[in-house]
Image (cartoon, rainbow, N blue to C red):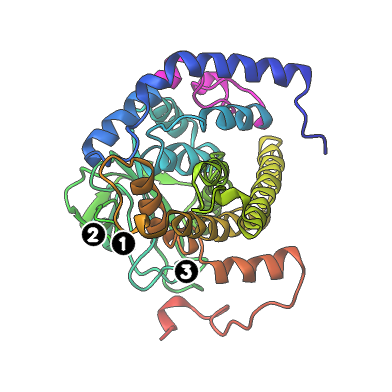
Amino acid sequence: MDFTDTPAEAAFRAEARAWLASHAPAHELPAGIKIPDTEEADRGRAWMRELFDGGWAGLTFPKALGGRGLSGIEAVIFAEEESRYHLPKGPFTSIGTGMALPVIAKHGTDEQRARFIEATLKGDVTWCQLFSEPAAGSDLAALRTKAVRADDGSGDWIVNGQKVWSSWAHLTDWGILVVRTDPTVPKHKGLTFFVVDMKTPGIETRPIRQISGMSEFNETFLTDVRIPDANRIGAEGEGWACCMTVLMGERLGSGAHRSGVEPLVDYAAATPDGRGATMLDDRSIRLQLAEALADERGLNHFQARLRTMVSKGENPGALAGMVKLGYAGRQQRVLGLGMELRGLDALAADPADTFTPDLQYDYIYSTVMRIAGGADEVLRNQIAERVLGMPGEVRMDKDVPFEQLK
């Protein structure tokens, strides 16, 4: 595989770089300062609108749906250039573009695609993910939130249950929701997928206070929530297939294309070691940074290959889990090294220091990535069984109706 840009790709990269240089700086987030989540959400919407108006949103989506109909490699190139800027592109925007839109595009109806894709790309509609539950995290198919048909003949669904770890659910417009509609079949087969307006009566979000001091996650309670059948994505009972489409997008997008290692290399080179040299002159530190950078570059190339597969209509399957598994582990190791480089200042940063607060926040948050989007242990099982062909783990519940599980 040749990782050098072709002449056409180089021209596209130059075009993207020039456009970003003219538009991205006005939308960058302030370094070392955590702004209120409502302000970050507003900034995220504004940047999405800027991308759409400039013709840089939904690059791989058909032009008829608001995209540009480009290839996967062009989307990768733009993401690489965009990552040079500190833009408001967290879960508030990526859940919509990286999770909701892929499942709507693949499993939705023409009406649903027309209703949601362009509006999401413009930032007019934002999304949260209503998957995990108190008793269904790594084993998502164990979820208990249920939906039954309304008894008034309308065809609507009535949903009751609880979701947890719902990022930005308190500020977003719509949610992607998976529920149990048939408890008489094994747990993976009785699920159905919906999109739900977060302003629907019966939905209550309760922000969770995190160790970082932020409250991005929520508990979400659904009490007699009425959802029209027109909001069902895919066929009844096809929820697990829809979930896999969502999770593949989430895992392929892990880490985006922002380097977590290069800033630390620059920082080590600028940090005196107290003996007349810099921290980068330490062979042990150089080795750790070199290994992390090589790992990051290799995984980014692998990620680009899988994105190209998706753009061709191919399904990477469990290979997508390798991207997320590699990124999460490396992120925690590299950020831990960054904290060590800061020394005691990592515990109490100078007020004028804008680098360390971001490092502290990212280090604390890095533990989340070992679980979110598939815990390390679950992904290793999937890779072992589905990529390496190793014997599957014994599952006593495989063919047992969900209602009979204890």
Q: Which residue is at the front of the view, 27 or 149?
A: 27
Percent x, y for residue 114?
Answer: 44, 27
Name the amino acid, label 1: Val
> In this view of the protein, can residue 131 be seen by the observer?
no
Q: Within 10 Å of the Cα at label 3, are there few (<14), some (14-19), or many (20+) other Cα atoms? A: some
3D distance between C-alphas at marks 3 and 1: 13 Å
> What residue sits 27% from the left and 30% below the top?
42
**Residue annotated with mark 2:** 208
3D distance between C-alphas at marks 2 and 1: 9 Å
3D distance between C-alphas at marks 3 and 2: 19 Å
From this viewpoint, which residue is outermost toward the right? 1
Is 192 displayed left or right of 199 in the figure? Answer: right
Where disc 1 sits, the SS reads strand
> What residue sits 23% from the left and 34% below the top?
39
Q: For the C terminus, give its image quadrant.
A: bottom left
Name the amino acid, label 2: Ile
Q: Is residue 406 magenta?
A: no
**Residue annotated with mark 1:** 164
Name the quadrant containing residue 50: top left
Name the amino acid, label 3: Ser
Q: Earlier in the sequence, mark 2 or mark 1?
A: 1
Where disc 3 sits, the SS reads loop
15 relative to 92, above or below:
above
Q: Earlier in the sequence, mark 3 or mark 1?
A: 3
Q: Nearer the viewer, mark 2 or mark 1?
A: 2
CB under 8 Å between callouts 2 and 1? Answer: yes
Boundaries of the magenta span: 50-72
Percent x, y for residue 303?
Answer: 66, 45
**Residue annotated with mark 3:** 138
> In this view of the protein, can residue 34 be seen by the observer?
yes
